Image: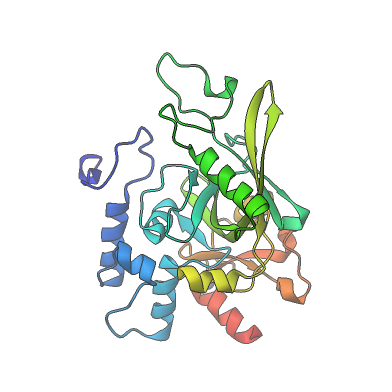
């Protein structure tokens, strides 16, 4: 199995838990029967043959996620058109950046959610671990690479300063979150509004403040993404509790495919994002049916 993964366009990686994008691309092609490639992802996934409304919807949603969708690592990479190896990806797309977060108890970085799910505080990243090098957790997080170029910390930091000091528009940042091994959710677009360096356990770490965008739709149009009007993040511990309670299945039909974290009472109608009682897992079909009833 491992040998068949070694496609040319895949960078070698020590973590082989997730097979590369090329494999996922072939899987999606087999599943959907059309030639989905990187430019399709970026141009919004043009469909090349007639499909009924439901499969058209599911096809689009696997490339262009809604906020709250449960996705695999490979689907995330397919949507972004790259093999995501790093947590921080400045200007991965032409018009936005991508960060991967994890607030699990054993997560490597201290990311946190504040202000009822509106604000995300994201920690910068350590120097890479090197043979005979220092413990990355014992040294300052770097602004610059050894050659003098900005690290990902530096790129995000400078972008935040340009917003604060030079009145430039804030950097849009797409946020994906790991729930458990191989299982991710799409958290939507945030705006990078501040950055600072603080002391933590005797060393300097970067902190980035991101605010969920009230205007997801404008960013979605600009970047060919879609979502409903979710404007509050479901905290990771709530997502984990819901996942466990619903056993990773649609609560209506038991499907384990194309799942979505659904607000039982929509946020717009006063439902909370912060309690598991108001969140459930639905498959794409039942999520769509429910949405049609509400709208
Ligand atoms: Zn279902």
Is 165 located above or below residue 197 in the figure?
below
Front one among 63 and 154: 154
Residue 192 location (% of width, % of height): 62, 53
Front one among 162 and 88: 162
Taking the spot 28% from the left edge, 53% from the top edge, the residue there is 23
Taking the spot 66% from the left edge, 60% from the top edge, the residue there is 212
Taking the spot 58% from the left edge, 63% from the top edge, the residue there is 68
Q: What is the image's colouring?
A: rainbow
Is 158 located above or below residue 232 in the figure?
above
Residue 38 location (% of width, % of height): 31, 62
Quarter placement of the C terminus:
bottom right
Quarter placement of the N terminus:
top left
Using the rendered image of the protein, determine whether residue 252 is visible from the camera's viewpoint.
no
Asked which quadrant contains residue 276, the reply is bottom right
Using the rendered image of the protein, determine whether residue 214 is visible from the camera's viewpoint.
yes
Is 207 located above or below residue 36 in the figure?
above
Front one among 42 and 247: 42
Left or right of residue 265: residue 72: left
Residue 264 location (% of width, % of height): 69, 71
Residue 176 location (% of width, % of height): 53, 53
Is 105 located above or below residue 98 in the figure?
above
């Amino acid at each position: 199995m491992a040998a068949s993964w070694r496609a040319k366009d895949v960078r070698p990686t020590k973590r082989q838990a997730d097979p590369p994008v090329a494999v996922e691309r072939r899987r999606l092609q087999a599943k959907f029967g059309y030639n989905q490639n990187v430019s399709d992802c970026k141009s919004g996934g043009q469909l090349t043959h007639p499909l009924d409304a439901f499969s058209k919807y599911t096809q689009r949603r696997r490339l262009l996620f809604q906020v709250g969708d449960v996705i695999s690592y490979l689907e995330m990479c397919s949507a972004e058109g790259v093999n995501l190896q790093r947590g921080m990806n400045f200007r991965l797309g032409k018009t936005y950046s991508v960060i991967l977060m994890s607030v699990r108890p054993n997560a490597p970085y201290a990311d946190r959610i504040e202000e009822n799910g509106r604000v995300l505080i994201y920690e910068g990243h350590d120097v890479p671990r090197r043979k005979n090098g220092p413990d990355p957790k014992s040294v300052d997080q770097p602004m610059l690479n050894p050659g003098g170029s900005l690290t990902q910390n530096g790129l995000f930091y400078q972008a935040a300063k340009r917003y604060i000091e030079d009145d430039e528009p804030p950097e849009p940042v797409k946020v994906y979150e790991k729930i458990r091994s191989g299982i991710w959710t799409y958290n939507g677009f945030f705006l990078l509004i501040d950055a600072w360096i603080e002391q933590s356990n005797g060393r300097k770490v970067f902190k980035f403040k991101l605010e969920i965008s009230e205007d997801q739709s404008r960013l979605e149009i600009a970047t060919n993404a879609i979502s409903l009007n979710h404007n509050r993040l479901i905290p990771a511990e709530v997502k984990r509790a819901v996942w466990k309670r619903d056993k990773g299945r649609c609560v209506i039909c038991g499907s384990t495919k194309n799942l979505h974290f659904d607000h039982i009472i929509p946020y717009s109608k006063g439902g909370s994002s912060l309690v598991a009682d108001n969140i459930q897992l639905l498959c794409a079909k039942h999520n769509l049916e429910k949405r049609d009833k509400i709208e």
